[in-house]
Image (cartoon, rainbow, N blue to C red):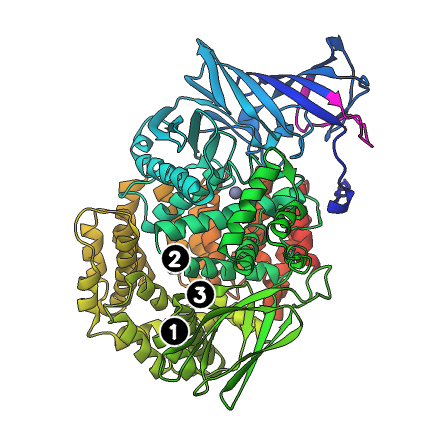
Amino acid sequence: MAKDTPQTFYLKDYTPFGYDVESVHLTFRLSPETTRVLSKIRFAPKADAADKTFFLHGEDLQLISAKIDGQEVAPEVTDKGLSCDVPGAPFTWEAEVEINPAGNTALEGLYMSNRMYCTQCEAEGFRKITYYPDRPDVMSTFTVRIEGDEPVMLSNGNPMGHGEGWAEWHDPWPKPAYLFALVAGDLVNHPGQFTTKSGKVVELNIWVRPGPDEGKCAFGMEALKKSMTWDEEVYGLEYDLELFNIVAVDDFNMGAMENKGLNIFNSSCVLASPETSTDANFERIEAIIAHEYFHNWTGNRITCRDWFQLCLKEGLTVFRDAQFTSDMRSEPVKRIEDVITLRARQFPEDGGPLAHPPRPEEFQEINNFYTATVYEKGAEVIGMLKRLVGDENYYKALKLYFERHDGQACTIEDWLQVFEDATGRDLQQFKLWYSQAGTPRVKVSEEYADGTYTLTLEQSTPPTPGQPDKAPRVIPMAVGLLSPNGDEVRATEVLELTEAKQSFTFDGLAAKPVPSILREFSAPVILERDTTNAERAFLLAHDTDPFNRWEAGNALAKEVRLAMVLDGAAPDGAYLDALEKLVRDDDQDPAFRALVLSPPSQADIAQTLFERGYTPDPQKIYDAAETFTQTLAQQLETSLPRLYAATTVEGPYAPDADSAGKRALNGRILSLLTRLDGGEQAARQYAAADNMTQQYTALAALMKAEKGDAQSQAFFDQWNDDRLVMDKWFALQIACAAPQKTAATAAALTNHALFDMKNPNRFRAVFGALAGNHAGFHHASGEAYALLAENLIALDKLNPQTTARMCAAFQTWKRYDAGRQSLIRARMSRIAGAPGLSRDTNEMITRILDA
Ligand SMILES: [Zn+2]
């Protein structure tokens, strides 16, 4: 059977829908396998519309009846939607369709999770609920009636009434269909209340299934209130409904969804308790609750004209949630964490076959563009813009954005126009960040003579798919200068690199300075500069910019490890001394010390080798990491017990940033100590732990040392009825496995009674950990490639969206040697040839293979 030729959508083809949607009334008659959806929609032809085609999207729907102004009609129906002859004046469209929520394993549209009805409509899930112009620029008010015997039945907006077997909702804010939500089930609420700055009282709820989850809502509720306060104080933005609901759902493709007034969360991103969540979980939950709440303005009140503009709402909202986390916790620590994530997720994407600009110009399946480039690089672009125009101008422009575009569906052009109007600055060249893919390289050279220091910066961006040549961009380079004795002689200033090659001079210096370049990581670029390890050690000790202090240590760690991999060198003694000095320095922030003590990931070393023209050998990278950590442990041997004791957090658990930073350092020290004491201290910590952070850290240290069998069993016995904790248990075994055992460990876990292919969290726990264990995934046997490929083929039949995303594990294949490349190519070809492959997965595999 021939596959259909996939359709490609282009930004340049945008045309507005020919009709206004004046109102939408929906009635749901819930039944697990035969839900009826009745729609009553008022359409009005637009006088100025060039294209008056009446086409409504619809997929996997059984059309029962259709009427226009009360008269039965017979529309032409395909598997993509329907078209129909319609009057030239305003008219009422009515349709009744039947859908099967229980059979919906793709988790798009209306589906069932754990006996609860829930929805996911972004990006194009609403078309699986009823026939509708399912595009973000079509906005309307929604009135929803839900009929069924579920105790709780929720939709967007404000409640209009409810009775035995029914509930009605009305959302007064016009919205696109992707923000529609419905939830029905046996749920209980954790209530809260918030008074806005203008004195409006908002009722808040976090809804969960009755049982243990009820005790895991308090932290999320506090995070929500903090987010509401922060958005009022920093951006002047207030909430606009009487009610804000959050629902926790176990089976969810994404992290969370900002549906108007009814956010739906993957339970892993909202439920928290000290006993079941780590410090990292708490920080992430706080950030995601903020992110979804902030979307109420940046995404919902002002939405995207079309899905090519996705980074308009996501880049800005990720930027806003990062600002929030910096304010709630530590600004430098948050920046360092974000850069680690950017380099781990976005740089490989930008440097490989999936590279695309933050605003792509074509796609086959929009679900495949919820990427690190759209989100994280999209946020970096906003950060650069703020740095270039300054804080005051940034907030002035944002104020204008909310005034000018409230209630509209906008484009990147609208966004940049606001900045041009507010600041008078020409942003044509800056706009290239939105249209050019690839990570720019900035090559640095320097000269010093007669008190004048000259810094020459040269930019270039390697070719990416469809973009062989790139024009120079505007790159804000934050630079400071230090004197040889470690004093700062020039405070941070932002150099604007706008040409391919440009020089900047600094006069009146007493001696040749040491430059601190790209402070705060002021642009998402790769810096290329010939420098010495001695200078990196100097910056690690003296730089006044905390990000660049960490960066110097990180670069030093990388050079040491690269020398070990390439030349078989021993770990550099001077670096070990510098680390020892820092880790013992109690004046330094524990969170910062923990970050400096965390070595660059093995994938990062592989990426760097590749960037420098070498073929990375995963096993050698693994061996170097092991040797380095063992040597470091031995170097610190005499201080480790004291450091462990000094950083142990006593007393009841609290998830605040200071305690979490201390526990992070304590955890790093425990993992080093475990290499020397045979796991004694870790076993004691495991036995005594009264919170998940300490329990998990001890278990991880023991499992890494292959001494954790008893504790792993105990952990399973304690937590096997908690799905989220079990995800950790599945992932940890694979993450800690030695390279030659990784694939077998993962394979065994897929046969475990608690492995559930239909639950995206569990699938990601196993296969995300497999792809994340660099040496194990890329073991020369190819077993891990085969295991992942076979499971992706199986998952594609159930859940194309999650399958397609997981294909990205193969995106770096061209980095490796011919043997590994041919193993991966064979596995990808098997996926590509699988009968009935989804459009999502087909697009991803084709892009990766064609590179
Ligand atoms: Zn978002």
Q: CA distance from mark 3 to mark 1?
A: 24 Å
Residue identifier under label 3: 601
Residue 58 at x, y = what percent? 69, 27
Residue 253 at x, y = what percent? 52, 40
Residue 61 part of the magenta segment: yes
Residue 82 falls in image quadrant? top right
Q: Is residue 536 left or right of residue 210?
A: right
Residue identifier under label 2: 331
Give the residue type that dot 2 points to: Glu
Give the residue type that dot 1 points to: Asp
Residue 763 part of the magenta segment: no
Residue 290 can be seen, yes or no:
yes
Residue identifier under label 1: 543
Q: Tell me if mark 2 has few (under 14), some (14-19) or many (20+) residues whose alpha carbon lies within 10 angstroms of its own.
A: some
Q: Secondary structure at mark 3?
A: loop
Return the residue nearer the eye: 389 or 434: 389
For the stretch drawn in magenta, the main secondary structure is loop
Residue 196's place in the image compared with 660, above or below, is: above
Q: Which stretch is magenta?
A: 44-63
Q: CA distance from mark 1 to mark 2?
A: 16 Å
Residue at 80% of width from left, 29% of height from top?
Answer: 48
Residue at 68% of width from left, 16% of height from top?
Answer: 95
Mark seen at residue 204? none
Q: Earlier in the sequence, mark 3 or mark 1?
A: 1
Q: Earlier in the sequence, mark 1 or mark 2?
A: 2
Q: Earlier in the sequence, mark 3 or mark 2?
A: 2
Q: Is residue 657 left or right of residue 818?
A: left
Residue 30 at x, y = what percent? 53, 17
